[in-house]
Image (cartoon, grey):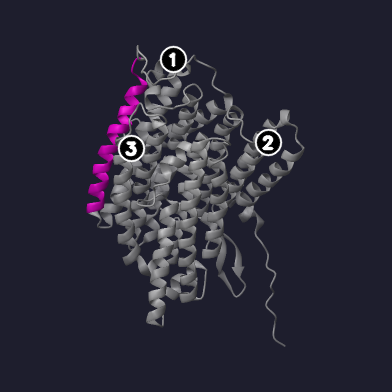
Amino acid sequence: MSSITPLVQSVDWLALAPPTLTAAVALVVLVADLFVPAARKPLLAWLSTAGLVLATLFLLPLLGGDRRTFCLPAHPDVCSYVADPFTLVIQFLVLGGALLTALLSIDTIKDQDLPTGEYWFLLLSSAAGAALLPASRDLATLVIALEVASLPAFALVGLRRGDRLSSEAALKFFLSSVAATAVMLLGVSFLYAATGSLHLSRVAHALTALPDPRLATLASAGVALTLVGFAFKTAAAPFHFWVPDTYVGAPLPIAGYLSVVGKAVGFSGLILVTVQGFPSYADVWGPALAVLAALTMTVGNVAALRQDPRRAHSAVRLLAWSSVGQAGYLLVPIAAAGYAHDPAHAIGSTVAYALMYAAVNLGAFAVAALVARTCPANRISDYRGLYARRPLAALALGFFLLCLAGLPPGIIGLFAKVTVFSVAVDAGLAWLAVIMAVNVVIALYYYLQWTTVLFRGAETAEAPETAPAERQPARARIPAPLATAIALATVLGIALSGAPQLVLRFASGALL
């Protein structure tokens, strides 16, 4: 009598704990919002923050292991969810970034009168999807996780009711993301038709020996369309057009969240599909990503260089264009993986750079949120004399900007850039390393220009367009959650600068 393969399989709930707990807390917050009176709504903020802390702590029992679940019964090594070192590092980045965003959001919700329950539910839901994505090892789960991370973000960007900039930002973000998803789904369907599987390991095996030339053509189209979809998600040029307006229209904590967690989602997905799903097509996606990296860093840095310091929201626009330029640097090691004998080692530089970028960029947005409390227009010129008004905040922002520029005392930024340079050179992409060097010099100008503004004396005469309400704002107390977020980002940046060998460890280790 033949044995029957069981359809019910055991689930490793500990491996699933970080995204599952985040999603569960999101549901609890949504239900609690119905019963908590308006005066007690701030409790939802602390419940959400505690949930993110707990989800982050659940990464500790997973260290040192390679846990898998949702595997095929006949092939236990083919799984949909894998908690390996790559997954844990990206989940730490995502949950840590969401935690800093939560601290930034507590006072923003109150100041801008945002709907409390909806805000926290959407933020936690997006974080749950972002934490699920790096563990996904089949194309269906990847797409679902990507959309769970993206759909709540649309609503968060447009949550300021009656604000024209917020509505326009949400619409641009929504339309570009929907277009990217449609392109990606078409590519995934082509790959499934050509290979007969959605699991990345099986897709990779099938692509090496397709029996029919027509299937090979279909698979090539699927690979290209899938990469285009992820290029939208990572804000790679020329698919970056939604970034500046979206960041300006969104609440500042959400702009910071998109710049860090949104990029982590896009880049982790891109790493998984290229390195694990399409290794046999490295001769296609390697050069394509190298060109995208060069174009993205150049467009982002040149646009940031052109920002007028007196234009409304110029500080946020500069951070937005800077994030596009930084996305170009993050693409370099992934492109180099297409030329490397061991792609898993090459992508370590992207992960190391992403960790540095996440800490200091969220810190920069935190200081921007502080300045926006008294200068809503958030011009770069509003930061003039910040050291005289708030010396600690000015020193913190100066440190963050120097880290992004790769200058001492931001040693971690320098080491991160050096690792990216070395990966490009080792892969034979000397031309890309040269373009990166030119862009680093361009970026030095606008980062240093903003840094010097912080320590200049305040202007004696007001510009004609400056509103009376924005003239030399009185010094007010910094809210405790906002101060905590700035302090955490600063401590993390200093700790990383004091131990740059951590970057080298990630850059030299095989995470996948």
Contact between labelled residues 2 and 3, with CB atoms less than 8 Å apart: no
Contact between labelled residues 1 and 3, with CB atoms less than 8 Å apart: no
Q: Which residue is mark 1?
A: 472
Find numbered disc 3 in the image and state the secondary structure of the residue it sits on: helix
Q: CA distance from mark 3 to mark 1?
A: 26 Å
Q: Is residue 219 left or right of residue 286?
A: right
Q: Which residue is mark 2?
A: 44
Q: Which residues are magenta?
A: 431-457
Q: CA distance from mark 1 to mark 2?
A: 35 Å
Q: Is residue 449 left or right of residue 245?
A: left
* Farthest-out residue, right: 35
The mark total stands at 3
Q: CA distance from mark 3 to mark 2?
A: 37 Å
Q: Please tell me which residue lies in front, 61 or 340.
A: 340
* Farthest-out residue, bottom: 1
Query: From what the image shows, is residue 159 above or below residue 281?
Result: above
The residue depicted at 30 percent of the width and 28 percent of the height is 449
Instruction: Estimate how packed mark 3 is, as few (under 14), some (14 to 19) or many (20 or more) residues with alpha carbons within 10 Å.
Output: many
Find residue 304 and name its label: 3
The residue depicted at 47 percent of the width and 24 percent of the height is 371
| Main secondary structure along the magenta-highlighted residues | helix
Q: Is residue 487 left or right of residue 402?
A: right
